[in-house]
């Protein structure tokens, strides 16, 4: 039995979502599930799912169970990315910058949406442990904000 993997790359993933005509919100698990009303949460999750769904290949077939690993490529100072008057602002970090943002706050929302996307696309019948039995995430630093991307690896066993 061989272990194989399939990669789905989501380039320039959104750091913010539009929550009204004039307001944007930075994506994060804590904000969505602890800090907003259910209408804003629903609108936010829909935007994330739409982005994810556009990147899952049509006709992808994988034998269950699978495991996933989400690799998040962002600048070391991703926490300092802001939306000001509808425009993203980011400056390169200084030489002694120490990261102070939570990886899981960013990872959870994308990981859950990607797992849900596999079910919606028919790749998996459900995202329960019978079909999705392991998951992980990690951060990898890039030089600038424009290089940000998500790489979702799906690992599975084959008879080859």
Image: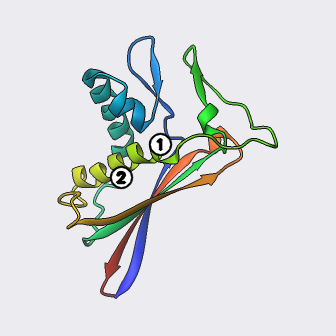
Local secondary structure at mark 1: helix
Q: Which of the two residues, 81 or 1, is positioned nearer the viewer here?
A: 81
Query: Mark 1 Cα within 10 Å, few/some/many (few <14, many 20+)?
Result: some
Q: Position of residue 114 (x, y in %)?
A: 35, 50
Badge number at residue 31: none
Q: Position of residue 31 (x, y in %)?
A: 41, 30
Local secondary structure at mark 2: loop
Left or right: 89 as drawn, with respect to 11: right
Q: Residue furthest left?
A: 125
Query: Mark 2 Cα within 10 Å, few/some/many (few <14, many 20+)?
Result: many
Q: How is the image coloured?
A: rainbow
Give the residue at x 66% y 45%: 76
Left or right: 60 as drawn, with respect to 103: left
Q: Quadrant of residue 62?
A: bottom left
Whichever of callouts 1 and 2 sits on the residue coming sooner in the sequence is 2
Give the residue at x 53% y 43%: 102
Which residue is label 2 attached to? 56
Decide: is 61 above or below 109: below
Give the residue at x 26% y 71%: 65
Could you tell me how many numbered marks the image carries? 2
Which residue is label 1 attached to? 106
């Amino acid at each position: 039995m061989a272990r194989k993997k399939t990669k789905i790359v989501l380039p320039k993933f959104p750091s913010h979502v539009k929550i009204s005509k004039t307001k944007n919100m930075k994506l994060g698990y804590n904000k969505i599930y602890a800090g907003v009303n259910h209408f804003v949460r629903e609108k936010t999750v829909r935007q994330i799912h739409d982005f994810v769904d556009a990147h899952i290949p049509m006709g992808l077939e994988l034998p269950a169970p699978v495991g996933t690993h989400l690799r998040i490529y962002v600048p070391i100072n991703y926490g300092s990315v802001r939306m000001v008057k509808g425009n993203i602002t980011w400056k390169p970090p200084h030489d002694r910058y120490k990261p102070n943002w939570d990886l899981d706050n960013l990872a959870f929302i994308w990981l859950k949406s990607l797992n849900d996307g596999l079910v919606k696309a028919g790749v998996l019948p459900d995202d329960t442990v019978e079909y999705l039995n392991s998951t992980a995430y990690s951060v990898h630093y890039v030089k600038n904000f424009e290089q940000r991307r998500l790489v979702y690896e799906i690992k599975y066993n084959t008879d080859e």
